[in-house]
Structure formats: structure tokens, C-alpha cells
Amino acid sequence: MVREITLKIQTAYLYTVPLFLLLHQLPLLKLLHQLILLLLLFLPLLLILVLPLLLLFLLFLLPLFPQFQLR
């Protein structure tokens, strides 16, 4: 499951890099470029903050629900 999440993150980065390079060449979209830059800076921080909480949720709350129990 963690591997799937990391693969999704990697593909997201692979898609944002060409977009980032494209926006870097177009001065008209400077604001959008800066927004994407901010997003790229804050995305790892969000992942660092959210992933442990998600893992804690999976570890502690899922056993309370029998239909979601890991086999």
C-alpha cells in the first residue's frame, strides 16, 4: 500500500516537471509558475505531516472495524 502511494507521488512529480519547465519559459504564466513552485515546496511538507497520521489511523482505528481488517 505504501509502495502504491510512493508510485503515485513519483508519477505526480514526473508530470509536474515538464509543466514546470514549460511555465518557466512563458512569462505570461509567471503567477501560475510561482503557485506551482509553492505547491512543489509544500507538497513534501504536507506528505511528511499527513502520511504518519494516515498510518496511525490505519494501525489504530481500522482494527475497530471488522469489515476493514487486514488479513
Image: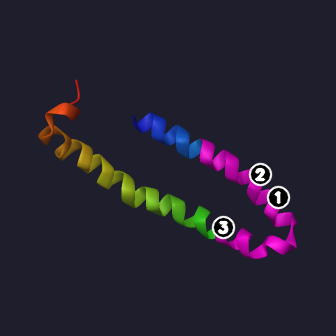
Tell me: 39 left or right of 5. right
Q: Nearer the viewer, residue 37 or 62?
A: 62
Secondary structure under the numbered disc 3 in the rendered image: helix
The residue tagged 2 is: 18
Identify the magenta region.
11-36
Q: CA distance from mark 2 to mark 3?
A: 13 Å
Tell me: 41 left or right of 49. right
The quadrant the N terminus occupies is top left
Secondary structure under the numbered disc 1 in the rendered image: helix
Q: Does the stretch in magenta take in 24? A: yes
Label 1 amino acid? Leu
The residue tagged 3 is: 37
Q: How is the image coloured?
A: rainbow
Q: Does the stretch in magenta take in 47? A: no
The residue tagged 1 is: 22
- Give x and y (percent) for residue 52: 33, 53
Magenta span: chief secondary structure: helix
Label 2 amino acid? Pro
Q: CA distance from mark 1 to mark 3?
A: 13 Å
Q: Is residue 12 above or below residue 24?
A: above
Q: Residue at x 30, y 47 (%)?
A: 55
Q: Residue at x 80, y 71 (%)?
A: 29
